[in-house]
């Protein structure tokens, strides 16, 4: 008999293909932020200014990948480079007001999508699902040795 994780793997794969952000009429739309920018801005917002080295460690990506991502985010006006507020040598990336505005808009679209999907769910069911998902994410983070900051 297969373990329940076989079913979980399949459902997780299906989940990764869905977009929760839709246009009017129910058609999926591409958000104004790419997934990588959405995650990058979210991390910088919650943790504060971060250097390429800190971002590399946080995302488990090489510096060249993060240099490309942060350069694109800078060109789009989403982040800016600043001197290290603590006086260190490395320059850090900080979310701009425009980046924060766009992130807030994108997050609200995601919440609206979740509200549509879970319209028939009781608040207690949503809270229970959230608790299990948080536990799942935190166990992954624990195994990787890289906890993600939460609000």
Image: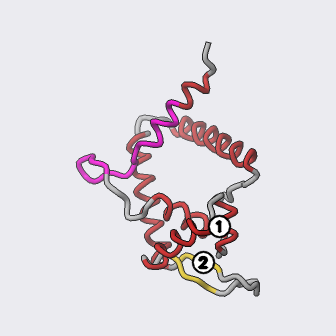
Q: Is residue 107 above or below residue 85?
A: above
Badge 2, how many Cα within 10 Å: few under 14, some, many 20+? Answer: many
Residue name at image x 72 percent, y 54 percent: 147
Residue furthest toward the left? 25
Above or below: residue 121 compared with residue 93: above
Residue nearest the viewer, comparing 120 with 136: 136
Q: Which residues are magenta?
A: 10-28
Image position of 65 (left or right of 33): right
Residue at position x 47%, y 39% from top?
Answer: 15
x, y (%) of residue 32?
A: 38, 64
Asked where in the image residue 140 lies, by quadrant, the reply is: top right
Q: Which residue is mark 2?
A: 93
Q: Tally the numbered discs.
A: 2
Q: Which mark is residue 9?
A: none
Q: Which residue shows up at 43% across the image and 53% down it?
A: 110
Q: Position of residue 25 (x, y in %)?
A: 23, 48
Provide the residue designation for mark 1. Answer: 55
- Image: 32 above or below 129: below
First in residue order: circle 1 vs circle 2: 1
* Helix, strand or loop status at disc 1: helix
């Amino acid at each position: 008999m297969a373990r329940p994780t076989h079913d979980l793997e399949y459902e997780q794969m299906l989940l990764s293909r869905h977009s929760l952000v839709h246009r009017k009429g129910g058609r999926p739309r591409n958000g104004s932020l790419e997934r990588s920018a959405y995650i990058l801005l979210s991390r910088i917002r919650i943790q504060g200014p971060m250097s390429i080295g800190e971002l590399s460690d946080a995302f488990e990506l090489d510096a060249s990948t993060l240099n490309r991502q942060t350069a694109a985010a800078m060109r789009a006006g989403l982040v800016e480079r600043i001197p290290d507020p603590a006086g260190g040598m490395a320059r850090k990336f900080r979310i701009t007001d425009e980046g924060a505005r766009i992130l807030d808009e994108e997050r609200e679209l995601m919440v609206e999508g979740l509200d549509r999907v879970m319209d028939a769910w009781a608040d207690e069911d949503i809270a229970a699902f959230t608790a299990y998902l948080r536990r799942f994410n935190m166990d992954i983070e624990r195994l990787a040795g890289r906890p993600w900051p939460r609000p």
